[in-house]
Amino acid sequence: MYPYISLTEQDVKDMLDSLGVNSVEDLFSDIPEELKLKRELNIPKAKSELEVYNYLTKLASKNASSSEYTTFLGAGAYDHYIPAVIPTIISRSEFLTSYTPYQPEISQGTLQYIFEFQTMISNLTGMEYANASLYDQGTSLAEAAIMTAHHAKKKKVLVSEAIAPWSREVLKTYLHAQHIEMEVVKTCNGVTCVDDLKAKLNEEIGAVLVQNPNFFGNIEDVTKISELAHSFKKCYSVVSIDPSSLGTLKKPSDCNVDVVVGEAQSLGIPISYGGPYLGFMAVNKEFLRKIPGRIVGQTVDRDGKRCWVLTLSAREQHIKRDKATSNICSNQGINVLTAAIYMDLLGKEGLKELSKQCIKKSHYLYKKLLETGKFEKVFDAPFYKEFALKAKKPVCELNKKLFENGIIGGFDLGKYYPELENVIMFAVTEKRTKEEIDKLCKVLEEA
């Protein structure tokens, strides 16, 4: 490990002498002899820094990235354009090393960008307060389910089948540990089935959780779902959103939603082979003291100048553990900063243009693929930037053909929804050009 571990033989001897043992092996004397591995580990010998660099470079070249391939794969990780100024700003040393702002007097920069992020998320969603932050969509949904169930003093929540499958798995894990039951509401025509929701709603339900646009890319009737949830006392409406869609779709607050969560990867954060991403939560005053993570507030210092402080932190590191509402222990600082810069750069008009381009381009591809005669409609629901079609060939064959032509194809829905065998889901962002879309259609038409 030289030169990274600088201990000399004398250093080791001095430490062993102070402990009153003769060798490093003596430190493991409590472990039975039959459990000890009495040989060298079967791993390659140590390499030099140059050899490691060359090996990792060769390994990384096996990946198919969106910088080399045109991608139409979404399902929660989207290839949006990231303005060049973003990596430049977040690479500044004062931002790159920022973490938890425990000492406000030396963390004003960090606190300010968290405050700006919270403010913009509140403006986008129409909710009164937003936190900073959660790990991703899955953890934000789980924290929202636990928070609403505890607040309602109930032990059961309803979860739409149209929520991302892996987020439902995270929900299941979190809720099991909290002894909260989770029941899945079926889908009809690619959206949450209102009739099934009505049948499963009762006085025992603490919250109804949906995703909008949902996992299939379709737009839910969130107002109707909230109305049904609120028809029972202390039953809350929770919606997970893609913030980029709010340039066109209604604000969640206009749909009478109680808690808004979501995944902010679409706000300037690279796909990065699956993470790290950025979950968020926005609420109204009723949940202000229950929200996980932290809330940064604006105040003035003793000289009357504007400054920022940690206002609320309902997490176990800051208050009595049995009083904490969450054990989320990071604010995803660099991703919060990225999203804040992205929203600030685009502004209201930029976000509207972004969502309009996603809608127009995805609908163009949808129409073109149906015209090939190789695909059939699956759902009639309106969609945002992602849609599903039934193929006449196995999805894996189509994606293989696309990959051979420099295109990362769509998501195979049959892997998680057996009833949707040979159904492929394409995502189209503002980055995709008419030429790229036409090329995809041509390759699939000839497949």
Image (spheres, rainbow, N blue to C red):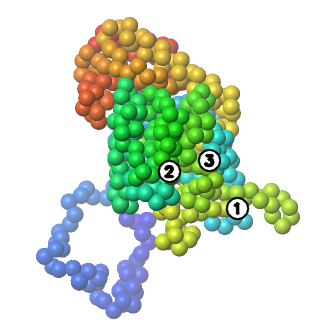
Mark pair 2, 3: CA separation:
38 Å
Q: Earlier in the sequence, mark 3 or mark 1?
A: 1
* Relative side of 400 to 335, left or right: left
Q: Residue at x 51, y 58 (%)?
A: 151
Residue type of the residue flagged with mark 2? Lys
Residue 113 appears in the figure: no
Position in image of residue 23 (x %, y %):
28, 84
Circle nearer the viewer, 1 or 2: 2
Q: Quadrant of residue 304?
A: bottom right
Position in image of residue 58 (x %, y %):
35, 40
Circle nearer the viewer, 2 or 3: 2
**SS for tag 3?**
helix
Question: Disc 1 marks which residue?
Answer: 309
Question: Disc 3 marks which residue?
Answer: 337
Residue 347 appears in the figure: yes
Question: Disc 2 marks which residue?
Answer: 233
Mark pair 1, 2: CA separation:
36 Å
Report the label total: 3
**SS for tag 2?**
loop
Q: What is the crowding at mark 1: few (fewer than 14 residues within 10 Å), some, or many (at least 20)?
A: many
**Quarter of the rendering occupied by the C terminus:** top left
Answer above or below: position of 65 versus 364: below
